Amino acid sequence: MLTHSTFFKWAGKTAVLAFTLFALQSCGDDDGTQDPPPDTTDPSVTIKDISAGQTVWNTISLTVEATDDDEIADVELFINNESVAQSNSATVDFDWNTFEEEDGSFTLKAVATDVAGNIATQEISVDVLNTLISASIPADFFEDSETGVIFLSNADGSLITSMEFENGDNITLKANDFDGEEFFLSEGYTPEGLQIYTFAKIKRGSTWTLSKDVDNDDDGVIIGTPFTASLELTGASLENGEYYNLYSHGEDLYEIDENQTLEIGLVDETSPLYIVKYSAQGEKLKYHYLNEIIAGENSLDLSLVNNDFSSVSFNITEDIESFQYDIEGFPSDDTYDVGFEVDRYEGNSEPETVTLYYPNDAFASYFTDIYYTTEDYEYEQFGYGIEGIAIRGITASIELQTGEESFNYTSSGSYDFLLIYTASDNMYNYFILPAGTSQETPLLSLPASLSDYDPSINIIGYAFYDHFSTEGYNEFIDELKSSEYGIGSVFGQGNSHAYLEFQVESSGDRKASIPDFFK
């Protein structure tokens, strides 16, 4: 029998168990499981195999990969904020044909979303560059109705693309089947047979300047002297046959050996006057330079002819067969039309040392032409300013091998580029090349517009060029691209340069002189 006290003990235990079960049930879901914490972790997303700032062209493959601690719901790729590819998986691929785009900067953005709605993005900018070469042809580039052709070649000489051009044309060359960064660029002209100028290692996207032979040969001819100056000369101090030479307009010469009144002709109402005092043996002793002699009456104190010359010397070695050294002075560094003869030597290996004199900075600028030959080579230097008076010289070495379809060279030295020229029956090809080791230069396939010509690897000469204002091939090419007329400008007036040229015995005994605008 259940007693009163026993009943209350049993009832108490039952109540505690029931409360415990109720409490546990109230803490769970309807299915009896506990809720997980919410997902707040962002996924990660990466645009593969491309980096910020990279330059791209033609068609490139883009891959976007995303990862998450749970599951990726969506991946999307945008180019300049326009959706171009989307996937409900963790990866999306897209082949981007950049050839359909304008050159310039593009923004790539990848967006990844996980199943919880968390979002991650990556954004980078790249540069599209499908233009190989661009150029603008001046309206007066050609005379009459002449035309030219520009063409690009790959490393094996195959034609990439080409274009004929005439005055006023704008050139843009592209090729979606060429995937390289560098190429050969050739300019072809047919005024008298075909002449091609080929430049190596030109970079994609270059703005090019076509080469024009600019006429820099000012003849310095003075037609008439409509003005007259009267010079009262005083202060002459001469001993043992000494004398003065007065130079006006760069060509008129007056020899003076006493005080006197001298009439000289002037082209303009004012003119500079250069006076040199000589020994009886013709040695330069002193000089004086006047900026202005005016039409009318002037006085000149010859005692002012007391300034010392500077000098430059050159040792003529036995292998030199002929030698010429000319220095001219110019009143202005803006034009080189009429110069004053400063000093000159012409001869051969006798004497062993030649010394020439110049009047320091009396003239605004100088032009110096140095030319000498040996049995094997010729050297010529065109120097402007005082720094161009001394012989600079070129040191160079080359190993040259030729085949039927290419030539290979290894060359080094103190020069900016190597000029190798080849010839066939009806054309010349001038290759402008950098120094280097085992450099392969192919026979070039010509565009259809030049199908009447037959290229050949028949080397007839080579020359090393030093352009004084540049250091190395790349600087020289940059200078050329920024010039007005390409080669014709960088070797024009005011640009100091030198070349060392060698002739090569070749089949057919063809010879070629270097074109004028390489001088």
Image: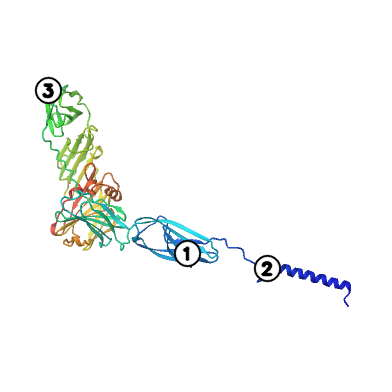
Q: Tell me the quarter of the image containing the N terminus.
A: bottom right
Q: Report if the CB atoms under discs 3 and 1 are less than 8 Å apart.
A: no
Residue type at the position of mark 1: Val
Residue type at the position of mark 3: Gln
As measured in the structure, the alpha-carbon distance from the residue carrying label 2 to the one carrying label 3 is 130 Å
Look at the numbered disc 3 and give the secondary structure of its residue: strand
As measured in the structure, the alpha-carbon distance from the residue carrying label 1 to the one carrying label 2 is 36 Å
Q: Nearer the viewer, mark 3 or mark 1?
A: 1
* Front residue (pair 499, 495): 495
Q: Nearer the viewer, mark 2 or mark 3?
A: 2
Q: Is residue 299 above or below residue 267?
A: above
* Front residue (pair 12, 314): 12
Mark 1 crowdedness (10 Å alpha carbons): few <14, some 14-19, many ≥20: many
Q: Is residue 125 above or below residue 271?
A: below
Q: Report if the CB atoms under discs 2 and 3 are less than 8 Å apart.
A: no
Look at the numbered disc 2 and give the secondary structure of its residue: loop
Mark 3 crowdedness (10 Å alpha carbons): few <14, some 14-19, many ≥20: few
Q: Which mark is residue 28?
A: 2
Residue 356 at least partly seen: no
Residue 355 placement (x, y as % from top left): 19, 36
Among the two numbered marks 2 and 3 on one chain, the one whose residue lies closer to the N terminus? 2
* Front residue (pair 130, 298): 130
Q: Return the residue at label 1.
A: 75
Among the two numbered marks 1 and 2 on one chain, the one whose residue lies closer to the N terminus? 2
Residue 149 placement (x, y as % from top left): 21, 56
Q: Return the residue at label 3.
A: 260
Look at the numbered disc 1 and give the secondary structure of its residue: strand
Residue 394 placement (x, y as % from top left): 24, 47
Residue type at the position of mark 2: Gly
